[in-house]
Amino acid sequence: MNTPDIKLTQSRALPSKREVDTLAHWVMLLPVEGWEGLDDALPYGEALKRRYERQPAERRKQRCLAVDLPNPRASHVAFACVTAEIGTFELLTLARQLVAPHVALEASALGVCVCGFEGAAAERMTEALLTAALAASTEMPRFTAKKTMPARLERIEIYGCEATHGFERSYAEAEGNGLARQLTGLPANELTPGHYRRWVAALAKGEGWHLEFLDLKALARRKAGAFLAVAQGSPEPDAGIVHLKYGPPRAARSGGLALCGKGICFDTGGVNLKPANFMLGMHKDMQGSAVALGTLLALTRLKVPFPIECWLALATYHIGPSAYKPNDVVTAMDGTTIEIVNTDAEGRMVLCDTLTLASRAKPTLIIDFATLTGACKRALGNSYSGVFTNRPEYYAKGGLHLAVVYTQQAPSRTSSPSPDPNIL
Ligand SMILES: [Zn+2]
């Protein structure tokens, strides 16, 4: 698996005509109000202005527009006009749309131009376009017989913004984001809990993370009855909880961040079996764990100065003669007794024991990621993630922004609602 290795150049100035002519592929963000005055400062601004004015007035704002420039390369420019107040989700969505045609054309170099915005607003616009370009360049698992790989983006030239941090965070987030998407793209016969654990072990070795794996015997010793109830239907004894530790030098031994994730490599629903169309895609029921792991990778890349523990609850949820049943009563690690009502609510079963383990280390903050309930999808649709917290200050400060962006999914191809929206 590869994360994008793309060279970056930055310039506070707008591109010269010669620089525009050098590249065949451009994405640009311009202000809704008053950008017309920029058409002198921006080479070929007149062509952009004509394209903008051809658009009906009510469909000019936040629309992906395109124009081929009258230069020898016929440089393709995808641009949009936005306000500085545009929401993060809308901005990232627009950035993806602007970048997409260039990726389809296998651009090896992309010009990114932010024109008419200053300071933090210019940086935010640039970050969005860079994030979209890096995400689009991440290699996803391929299973087609066709061996030829599409050409990859190798270079991004930024104009209209120069940041001293060199967009390190965008690159780190792209690595974590790419990792989560790559893992989620693997089918359940390629990513069993055993494969997943070995794969994480190799990653941990490279990143310098301490790794411990709590297998079924270790979990039985800890009386993790809720996790074990989900695992007991599996013919393979490969389920367990991965525990990773990141520790910067001289970090405090307690406190810090705990990341937890639901890693059900395939979810049949158990005895309360899912209907066929709702079982399709259930290899993605591990993406909470992939997001936790991707977040750990991004924070490691950024060399954050606090300790992090990461807990991944890995299991394949099979149905079989030994699978747990409705009305079974099991005892979780913390002594709570649970009567099973719907066996398809296995996520909270594996996570309650995982959260007990995570909380015993007394972290300052626990973030838990899961594809836990279809009711969330019904309430918010397929593009947004629900965030629940007993510490609203973290949400209000945008501290969960990273996590929310990671879990955005592509719109579903089906529009029919789940027969039981409470269960995933
Ligand atoms: Zn389920």
Image (tube, helix red, strand yellow):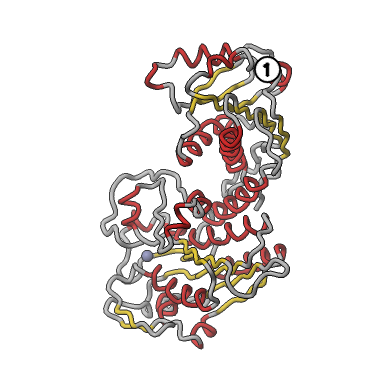
Q: Secondary structure at mark 1?
A: loop
From what the image shows, is residue 75 above or below residue 283? Answer: above
**Residue 336: quarter of image:** bottom left
Q: Give the side of residue 363 with respect to residue 304, left or right.
A: left
Crowd tier of the residue under label 1, counting other residues whose Cα lies within 10 Å: few below 14, some 14–19, many 20 or above: some
Number of numbered discs on residues: 1
Q: Is mark 1 within 8 Å of ligand 1?
A: no
In the image, what residue occupies the spot 42% across and 69% down? Answer: 317
Of all residues, the one furthest to the bottom in this rendering is 221
Q: Is residue 46 visible?
A: yes
Q: Which residue is mark 1?
A: 73
Q: Quadrant of the C terminus?
A: bottom left
Drawn side of residue 35 relative to residue 71, left or right: left
Give above or below for 328 relative to 371.
below
Q: Is residue 352 above or below residue 406?
A: below
104 vs 144, nearest the viewer = 104
Inspect the image, locate mark 1, and give the three-letter code of the amino acid beneath it: Arg
Q: Is residue 265 visible in the rendered structure shown here?
A: no
The answer to whether 129 appears left or right of 272 in the picture is right
Residue 283 in the image, given as x and y percentages of width and height: 46, 59
Q: Which of these two is toward me, 258 or 362?
A: 362
Where is 106 relative to 277, above or below?
A: above
**x, y (%) of residue 307?**
63, 67
Identity of the residue drawn at 42% across and 58% down: 392
The quarter of the rendering in which ligand 1 is drawn is bottom left
Q: Residue at x 71, y 44 (%)?
A: 5
Give coordinates of residue 362: x percent, y percent.
Answer: 53, 75
Q: Percent from the top left, x then y, of residue 195?
A: 59, 67
